[in-house]
């Protein structure tokens, strides 16, 4: 057999392997009802973000960072070059005073995550100024804390296991905030130290917070399965598994925790396709930010073959269609739980106020749209 024939045979084999997966994905992630396609929804929500004011006029806060990241990935995956240009233009004022005063450098996961956005811009443009800015956050996150600084929740850095960031506080939210920054630094540089940091941190939180039923407490002393809190963890694991090599020593542990959680989510999904403010309380109200995060994590698992597509594909599809139903005519997501600190009180979670257009809810819609296009 000559070389050309061998190449044709190899190509045909790849097609035979790829086609069944592609057809299965098309079955669940195509032929969308009118007005629900990820291309249409992602474009509406991302363009709305471009023209929106900063959520906090005094500093860039993490929900805005997460929305910005999602808008950038959606623009790149959808091939919308003008949207990419507009999203970068929105960032440019932050590179020098007075705009740079909006960049908050307090040692806390909610502010450190800012670096994920310039790192994404670097990945897409290769402009070194964005790499320098993003890396400064990723590197500082693992630096020792100054003597007069302590992370929230009273955890002393000297009591943490070696290799964890001093910003560790064992709140479920952290497993997106800390890990996405380090994963972005790895994607931008190829330096495995960022990957190893994120994976070690993820495993420590899995061991601390995941319960036998597969879900996660908000914190060790707060035994509630708060929707968005668990959503942060689900999204963080999905993001990490996208880039974690098959031979990485922590991959098996993280994949196990991810699949355990997805099984629990499947069992707790409402008949309407949504998840609730408290995941295991059917009487709780349907909450959009958590639903968006779980949808992103589930789509990503189906597309990468980590989950059975015939079980999780329909669940993810139903969740996406349900979520889109909560987006109003202004491209604002409704029924978004407000920012929520931990509290050992059931009523506190069940009665949290709901916002419209809060970037906690805008962000995961863009992540899910990106996952459907990826």
Image (spheres, grey):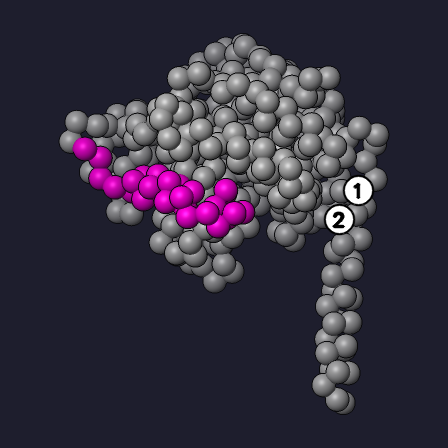
Secondary structure under tag 2 reads helix
Which is nearer the eye, 24 or 42? 42
Secondary structure under tag 1 reads loop
Which is nearer the eye, 119 or 355? 119
Q: From this viewpoint, is residue 280 visible?
A: no
The percent position of residue 63, horizontal first and vertical second, equals 49, 26
Point out the tag, 2 or 1, that comes first from the N-terminus: 2
What are the residue bounds of the magenta stretch? Answer: 120-146
Task: Name the quarter where the N terminus is drawn.
Answer: bottom right
Residue density around tag 2, few if under 14, some if 14–19, many if 20 or more, within 10 Å: some
Residue at position x 65%, y 53% in the image: 305
**Is residue 15 highlighted in magenta?**
no
**Is residue 132 highlighted in magenta?**
yes
Task: Judge from the rendering whether residue 340 lies leftward or rightward of residue 317; answer left or right.
Answer: left
The quarter holding residue 115 reads top left
Q: From this viewpoint, is residue 224 visible?
A: yes
The percent position of residue 202, horizontal first and vertical second, equals 42, 43
Nearest-to-viewer mark from 2 and 1: 1
Report which residue position mark 1 lands on: 30
């Amino acid at each position: 057999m000559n070389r050309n024939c061998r190449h044709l045979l190899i190509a045909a084999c790849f097609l035979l392997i790829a086609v069944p997966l592609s057809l299965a994905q098309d079955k669940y992630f195509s032929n969308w009802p009118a007005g629900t396609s990820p291309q249409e929804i992602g474009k509406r929500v991302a363009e709305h973000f471009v023209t929106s004011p900063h959520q906090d006029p005094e500093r860039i806060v993490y929900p805005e960072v997460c929305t910005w990241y999602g808008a950038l990935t959606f623009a790149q995956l959808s091939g919308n070059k003008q949207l990419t240009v507009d999203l970068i233009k929105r960032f440019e004022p932050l590179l020098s005073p007075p705009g740079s005063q909006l960049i908050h450098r307090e040692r806390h996961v909610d502010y450190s995550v800012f670096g994920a956005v310039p790192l994404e811009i670097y990945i897409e443009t290769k402009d070194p100024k964005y790499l320098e800015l993003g890396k400064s956050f990723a590197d500082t996150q693992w630096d020792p804390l100054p003597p007069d600084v302590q992370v929230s929740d009273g955890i002393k850095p000297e009591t943490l296991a070696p290799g964890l960031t001093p910003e560790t506080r064992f709140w479920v939210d952290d497993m997106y905030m800390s890990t996405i920054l380090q994963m972005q630094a790895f994607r931008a540089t190829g330096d495995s130290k960022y990957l190893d940091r994120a994976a070690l941190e993820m495993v420590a939180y899995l061991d601390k917070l995941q319960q036998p039923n597969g879900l996660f407490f908000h914190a060790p002393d707060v035994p509630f399965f708060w929707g968005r809190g668990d959503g942060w963890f689900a999204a963080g694991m999905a993001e990490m598994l996208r880039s974690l090599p098959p031979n990485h020593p922590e991959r098996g542990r993280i994949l196990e925790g991810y699949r355990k959680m997805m099984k629990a989510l499947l069992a707790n999904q409402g008949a309407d396709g949504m998840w609730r403010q408290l995941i295991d309380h059917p009487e709780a109200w349907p909450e959009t930010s958590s639903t968006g995060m779980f949808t992103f994590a589930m789509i990503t698992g189906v597309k990468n073959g980590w989950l059975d597509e015939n079980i999780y594909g329909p669940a993810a599809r139903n969740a996406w269609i349900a979520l889109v139903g909560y987006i109003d005519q202004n491209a604002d997501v409704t029924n978004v739980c407000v920012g929520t600190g931990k509290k050992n009180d059931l009523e506190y979670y069940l009665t949290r106020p709901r916002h419209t257009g809060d970037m906690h809810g805008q962000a995961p819609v863009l992540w899910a749209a990106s996952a459907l296009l990826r």
